[in-house]
Image (cartoon, rainbow, N blue to C red):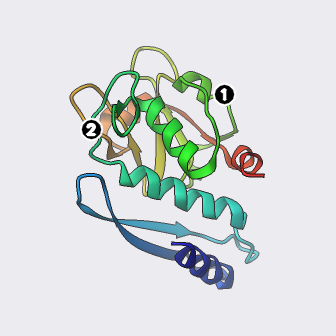
Amino acid sequence: MKYLILLFAIICNACLVAPCIAAEETENVAGETITIIDEHVNDNTGNASFTSGWQDKTQEIIMNAMSLTGIKYKYGGTSPETGFDCSGFVRYVFSQATNLALPPTARAISQLGKTVNKDELQPGDLVFFNTLKTAFSHVGIYVGDNKFVHAPRSGAAVRVESMQTGYWAKRFNGAQRLDKLTENASN
């Protein structure tokens, strides 16, 4: 894994304008093979749009999140053994991938980091939705290509969904990037 990340960083630093794409296959908890694709785009100056440290962390965040697809939803759940609710899932992934201890609710998590416009989303950003007739009542992790991974509701399991479907598109509240917080958590 570390070698793949290192190779990914070297390739992306060599790119000038074209996007760099890295893919890795892994298994989720249900034993299904999933492919994680990370697309990294440089700006017009040839500079990487993310710092190398944040790139490494986002790769870990996405890998951890995707490996948990199939875990059943459980209100108040905070681990793969018990199941997850939306904030428990995000807290667990960020704790495992970045050593960052997030607050227990989607609303409290929404107050961290820096606000990101929808058209500037990058893998690893947190996306928030109004699902309970209150702002920031649901949270997931953006994985790219207008998709996010989350623990949706009772009777369902952690999964990837499109933010463009009617339900999620109508309820989108905003997004946050925790890049500075995760840098501080691992120092």
Is disc 2 surrounded by few (<14), some (14 to 19) or many (20+) residues within 10 Å?
Answer: many
In this rendering, position of residue 35 left or right of residue 112: left
The residue tagged with tag 2: helix, strand or loop? loop
Judge whether 109 appears above or below 80 on screen. Answer: above
Report which quarter residue 36 is drawn in. Answer: bottom left
Q: Residue at x 42, y 28 (%)?
A: 171
Instruction: In the displayed orientation, state which residue is furthest to the front.
Output: 81
Q: Which residue is mark 1?
A: 111
Judge whether 153 appears above or below 149 on screen. Answer: above
Report which quarter residue 77 is drawn in. Answer: top left
Q: Are marks 2 and 1 in contact (CB under 8 Å)?
A: no
Q: Residue at x 27, y 38 (%)?
A: 157
Image location of residue 139, percent across then percent down? 47, 33
Q: Residue at x 44, y 37 (%)?
A: 89
Give the CA distance from mark 2 to mark 1. 26 Å
Three-letter amino acid code of the residue under disc 1? Gln
Q: Which residue is mark 2?
A: 157
Three-letter amino acid code of the residue under disc 2? Ala
In this rendering, position of residue 102 left or right of residue 1: right
Is there any visible trace of residue 118 in the rendered image? no
In this rendering, position of residue 45 left or right of residue 62: right
Image location of residue 151, percent across then percent down? 36, 35
The residue tagged with tag 1: helix, strand or loop? loop
Report which quarter residue 185 is drawn in. Answer: top right
